[in-house]
Amino acid sequence: MNGAVPAGRIISNAGADEQKPTASTINCTVSATIEDSMQGIVGEAVSKAA
């Protein structure tokens, strides 16, 4: 098999809008607003890791 294969949680949430309306098919979520630049991304990562 070639390419990325989504994990079980991703597959189980796909198409499940009626059963799980708050479910996401995104594996990574961010709850803060981050500046769209390398400096903003790295700065946020460094501040969260500290």
Image (spheres, rainbow, N blue to C red):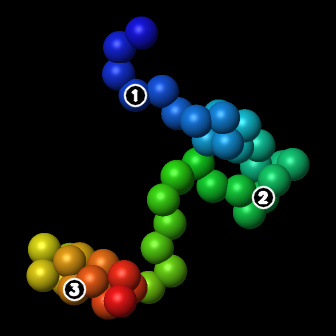
Query: Label 2 is placed on what type of residue?
Result: Pro
Q: Quadrant of the C terminus?
A: bottom left
| Total marks in image | 3
Q: Residues within 10 Å of mark 1 (few under 14, many from 20)?
A: few
Whole-percent x, y for residue 47 in the image: 32, 90
Which residue bears the numbered disc 3? Answer: 43
Name the residue nearer the viewer: 36 or 15.
Answer: 36
Apparent side of residue 19 relative to residue 1 in the rendered image (left or right): right
Image quadrant where residue 32 sits:
bottom left
Image quadrant where residue 37 sits:
bottom left
Whole-percent x, y for residue 33 in the image: 38, 86
Which residue bears the numbered disc 1? Answer: 4
| Residue at x 22%, y 85% (from the top left corner) | 43
Number of the front mark, 3 or 2: 3
Query: Label 3 is placed on what type of residue?
Result: Gly
- The answer to whether residue 15 shows anywhere in this view is no
In the structure shown, which secondary structural element does the residue marked by tag 2 occupy? loop
Q: Residues within 10 Å of mark 3 (few under 14, many from 20)?
A: some
Which residue bears the numbered disc 2? Answer: 21
| Residue at x 84%, y 49% (from the top left corner) | 18
Query: Label 1 is placed on what type of residue?
Result: Ala
| Residue at x 13%, y 74% (from the top left corner) | 38
Q: Is residue 12 above or below residue 42?
A: above
Marks 3 and 2, Cα distance to the nearest angstrom?
Answer: 33 Å
Marks 3 and 1, Cα distance to the nearest angstrom?
Answer: 28 Å
- The answer to whether residue 40 shows anywhere in this view is yes
Marks 2 and 1, Cα distance to the nearest angstrom?
Answer: 25 Å
Task: Say which label, 2 or 1, has the lower sequence index.
Answer: 1
